[in-house]
Every structure is written in structure tokens, then in C-alpha cells.
Amino acid sequence: MAWVHMDSAALGDSVLDLYERDGVYMIRVDGWELMNGEYHESEDRLGELAAQLARRPDPDILVGGLGLGFTLASLHRHLGAAGRVTVAELSEAVIRWFDRHTKPRTLGDHPFRIRQGDVLAVAAEGSAEGPAFDVILLDVDNGPEPLSAAGNAALYGADGLGTLRQALKADGILMVWSAFEDPEFVGRARSAGFSPASLPVFRPGRAEPFHLVYVLSASPFRPGELDRFGLQPL
Ligand SMILES: C[S@@+](CC[C@H](N)C(=O)[O-])C[C@H]1O[C@@H](n2cnc3c(N)ncnc32)[C@H](O)[C@@H]1O
């Protein structure tokens, strides 16, 4: 069965499209697949890892962006009733599609807050009254390069990384989903004061890593932490 086109929406100079096939959704940006509900292992793993890596039992977590909501649903599965989750989503249409169509059934009735806007602005706002977040989790592009919005270059540069670090508590963690390795981004993260590590994400039955998650700690990793989570220091 072919994907059925359901809706289009502008996002800055780009166009987002929502497709559906057999109850599974896909979002494309300018024709490129941004999120496909057929494969969400790494989005699930991202949420699980964020819940596990948080260094407080009742963490404040900022997620950017919403997409099809798999990371959000996974976070809640692994946080249980603990913590507070805020999702920043740039596109009003993605939020509308989530409310009408795409919200994963596994999300249940866990409470969360969706803010429409740039995750960098939401992070900066949170930090005006002091460091706000235990974990900030970025899955807005295909890696630390702008894809879904040209303005996202700001997120991965020295200033953006500095803003994100200020929005984190002293032992907070920034996580960045990526489809590729980016040593220059790692260098900028180190210059911004982060201790960098990465986690390869495997697809069931495959020997080669599928994606990776950059795990950038605002404080040095604690003894045993890297091994416990299978993180590779960079
Ligand atoms: C790859 S999808 C996220 C997938 C999501 N983790 C999931 O589980 O479905 C990227 C999302 O980030 C949003 N986005 C892009 N740039 C953003 C930004 N600067 N701030 C907030 N959301 C952004 C896009 O509109 C899109 O909904």
C-alpha cells in the first residue's frame, strides 16, 4: 500500500508534509524523510536513555522537537510518574497533527507541556531564572546540522551550545540524536565546557550501528557512568 498524503504546512522557507499508511505516519521536510513511524528504535532509545541518565530522581527534561511523539512516549514509559517534561516544537502544524492523528497510543495519560517555538528560545527562557533543566534532548534535525529549519545552525554553534549549557543544571546533560559522526561539533561542545561521549544505537538483528546519540555532560562523567550506559568517551 502506498503512503497517503494527508496535509502540508510551511515551516519558514521549507514545506512539511504528513503521510499515513496503515495507521503509521511519516513527516517529510522538502521531500526528505524527517521522521518515519515505521522505524522508531533510536527515538525510543533516546527517551529511555534520557530518563536513565538524569542525575536526579525527579528531573526536569526539555525535548526538542515533537515529531511523531515517540521520544516523548518513551520518556514517559521510563520516567513513570517522576519528573516534568516540556516539549518545544517549532511547527504549529506538527502540534496539530499530533493532537488529531499522530499521538502514539503508548503515550497514555502522562502529563507533559508542549510549547510552540524554537527549542533554543525555550531553553534560554528557562535559564533566565537560573539553570532549569536536568536533561535537554535534541532531535530536531538528522544530526548537528540544520535540516528542518535553516535557523537550526544556531543550535549547534558555539553560542547555541553555550546557551544550552547555561540552561542546564550544573550536572545536567545535553543529548543530540545524529545519523552521522561530526568531530567538529564534538570539538565545539568541548570548548563550550561539555564532557562529550557518544552512544551507538543498533537496530535489532544488525551488527552495524544505525544512529548515534551524542551525550554531552555539563560536569565530568561520574565513575562507572560511561560503562553503565555503554557510552564511548570522545
Ligand atoms: C526528527 S523530528 C523529531 C522526532 C521525534 N523524536 C519523534 O520521536 O517522533 C524533528 C522535529 O523537530 C521539529 N523542529 C525542528 N527544528 C526545531 C527547533 N529549532 N525547535 C523546536 N522544534 C524543532 C520539527 O518540526 C520536527 O517536528
Image (cartoon, rainbow, N blue to C red):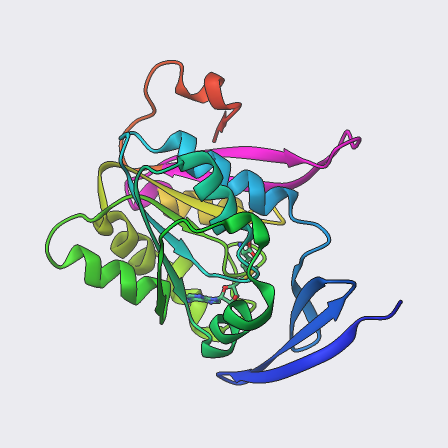
Of 62 and 114, nearer the camera is 114
Write the residue at 40% across / 14% down: 224
- Which corner quadrant of the image does residue 135 belong to? top left
Visible in this render: residue 105? yes
Of 25 and 228, nearer the camera is 25
Percent x, y for residue 23? 73, 62
Percent x, y for residue 93? 51, 78
Q: In which quarter of the image is the N terminus?
A: bottom right
Visible in this render: residue 181? no
Residue 175: say if magenta.
Answer: no
Span of residues in magenta: 190-216
Of 111 and 46, nearer the camera is 111
Write the residue at 29% across / 53% down: 164
Percent x, y for residue 211? 64, 43
Write the residue at 30% across / 29% down: 55
Count of all numbered marks drawn on residues in the image: 0
Left or right relative to 123: residue 80? right
Q: Which residue lies furthest to the left in this view?
A: 129
Left or right relative to 78: residue 56? left
Q: In this view, does 135 lie above or below 30?
A: above
Percent x, y for residue 225? 40, 20
- Which corner quadrant of the image does residue 129 belong to? bottom left
Write the residue at 48% across / 61% down: 66
Q: Residue furthest front?
A: 109
